[in-house]
Image: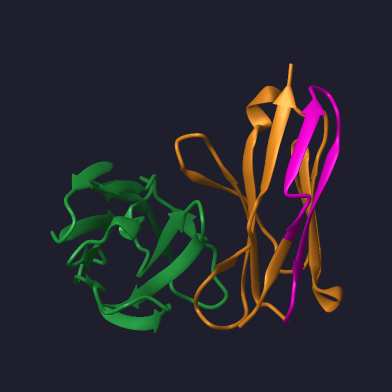
Amino acid sequence: GIQVEQSPPDLILQEGANSTLRCNFSDSVNNLQWFHQNPWGQLINLFYIPSGTKQNGRLSATTVATERYSLLYISSSQTTDSGVYFCAVDNYGQNFVFGPGTRLSVLP
Amino acid sequence: KAGVTQTPRYLIKTRGQQVTLSCSPISGHRSVSWYQQTPGQGLQFLFEYFSETQRNKGNFPGRFSGRQFSNSRSEMNVSTLELGDSALYLCASSPGGVPYEQYFGPGTRLTVT
């Protein structure tokens, strides 16, 4: 089945810094989403982005489907951005395969 | 529009018992998927239901089962609980078309003692 890798596994930032999270996948996909998991376990939708670029406030994402990767950019990070970020993909199988996540800690 | 709801939010069961978890999707969504999250295995797909039919299944033993009702609400059942079934169980709903965007509920945290 499709494999999903995320890097880095852990990231510690000072408030106000920028960061880039990466998601690599091993096969073509028809669906890719980025999620933020809060401390209570809720997965919050950030982007639905099987291809192209999207922006939402301080966050933006780019997926280059032909090269099988996606990037999540966080600018001017805040302590509330802390948590685990997951990339999930589907390669026409009607189910998501999640990456292992990137744990982000933003220090005040 | 109300989001995905899951009940109960927390559950403690004893090894050997069975458990039923419930998920109500976003109104109008016809697809419900279930995922298990553990520290060791991460987030893993259990199964997906669409219009009361199981459309896809992950690699879990037969002790894990589910169903979907005509109003799209879904339940998953785990029989003969094992300690390793302790996990956060997440439900996601989507309209059902392809491709699709999934929306997740808050999860049910199951502890097996």
Q: Is residue B79 left or right of residue A48?
A: left
The residue at 23%/56% (across/down) is B22
- The chain that appears orange in the image is A
**Residue A17, percent across and down?**
86, 28
Q: Is residue A47 left or right of residue B69?
A: right
Q: Is residue B79 left or right of residue B103?
A: left
Rendering colour (chain B):
green
The residue at 72%/81% (across/down) is A27
The foreground one among B4 and A16 is A16
Quadrant of the rendering where the C terminus of chain A is positioned: top right
Q: Is B27 included in the stretch rendered in magenta?
A: no
- State the extent of the magenta-drawn residues as a range: A6-27
**Residue A106, percent across and down?**
73, 27
Residue A1 falls in which quadrant of the image?
bottom right
The colour scheme applied to this rendered structure is by chain
Residue A53: in sight, yes or no?
no
Q: Is residue B87 left or right of residue B67?
A: right
Q: Is residue B39 above or below residue B31?
A: above
The foreground one among A5 and A60 is A5
The foreground one among B7 and B89 is B89
The residue at 63%/53% (across/down) is A86
Residue A63: in sight, yes or no?
yes
Q: Is residue B94 above or below residue A65?
A: above
**Residue B49, percent across and down?**
33, 75
The foreground one among B43 and A66 is B43
Q: Main secondary structure of the magenta part?
A: strand
